[in-house]
Image: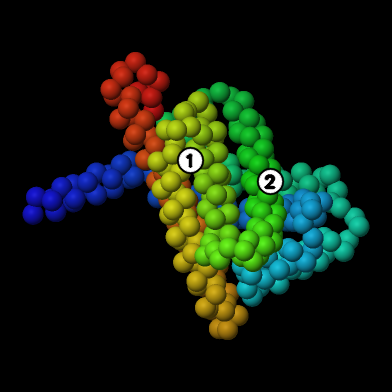
Amino acid sequence: MIYTKKLYNWFNKIANRLEADNVSAYASQAAFFLFISAFPFLLLLLTIIRFSPLTKDMLLSFISGITTGVIQDTLTSWVNELYDSHIGFMSFSIVIVLWSASKGILGIVNNINKIYGFSDHKKDMYVIKRLLSILYTFVLIAIIIAAFILINVGNYIGAWLEKYIHLFLDYNFIIALAMFFFIFLIIYTYVPYKKVKLKEQLPGVILTTCGCLVFSFAYSIYMDYIDPTTSIYGSLSAIIFLLLWLYSCMYILFCGASLNVYFMQKKASKKPRTPYNNV
């Protein structure tokens, strides 16, 4: 009975902290901005990938493996058009797409800094935030391209190693795990306006990496076993599940930020004159 009460108090304390940090509201806002900026981001990503070592067949094979229905048809048509066309985007079009794609990143930047307690009181902060969000967008694109290349290279290396050593490793899972970990480590370390220590962000990085992988795995099961085109409401349900997945990942991301703040405050309480007292 005593342990049950302690467990209840512990969960109640966590719930109160997440409510105080407005995690649910921030997750909803970030998920919405990510959703409306998803297609501009994908369009920009595919445009940049065209000039990378990745071939058209590699991309089409990857797209067919992770998507179905309308999303797969749309991405496939984009890839075909981008690789078959010899005319790139005009400069003005690139600016519009980049500005739209960075909107989702900007939502994450704003909300993480609110949880950390870092304000943007400077008048020119909006311009700086927009430029930083564009920079983070390019960083994210670079990480995704590197992951695509590693997946293809990893498959060749795995096939070569299995001739000599029988391995039970899923290279795609390892690459996805490393990519998630690296992305969240960058977010928690460099997105805050004030300097934070990298090692103090590891609790949130580990929590967010594991949580997002679990929800991504659950979403992939849904996409594998339920064809969105088989029913009248199939396409609508696919969009709803995509939004739920985005919301879940954003909720976990901000929970990780709240966890980092908790440990930083706990550490700062032992050292009264540290910057984290104001976090």
Within 10 angstroms of label 2, few (less than 14), some, or many (20 or more) residues?
some
Q: How many labels does the image show?
A: 2
The answer to whether one can see residue 40 in this image is no
Q: Split into 4 quadrants, where in the image is the N terminus?
A: bottom left
Element type where label 1 sits in the image: helix
Closest to the observer, 78 or 4: 4
User: In the image, what residue type sits under mark 2?
Assistant: Ala
Q: Split into 4 quadrants, where in the image is the C terminus?
A: top left
Closest to the observer, 123 or 80: 80
Q: Look at the numbered discs 1 and 2 and tell me whether their residues touch, using CB distance below 8 Å.
A: no
Identify the image's colour scheme: rainbow, by chain, secondary structure or one colour: rainbow
Which residue lies most toward the left here? 1
Q: Is residue 200 above or below residue 10?
A: above
256 left or right of 94 in image: left
Q: Earlier in the sequence, mark 1 or mark 2?
A: 1
Kindly identify the residue that appears in the image at 63 percent across and 35 percent down: 132
User: In the image, what residue type sits under mark 1?
Assistant: Asn
The residue beneath circle 2 is: 142
Q: Which of the numbered marks, if any, corresponds to residue 111?
A: 1
Kindly identify the residue that appears in the image at 46 percent across and 43 percent down: 205
Q: Where is residue 130 in the image (x, y as percent from the top left)?
A: 64, 36
Task: Determine the image quadrant of residue 211.
Answer: bottom left
Kindly identify the residue that appears in the image at 34 percent across and 45 percent down: 18
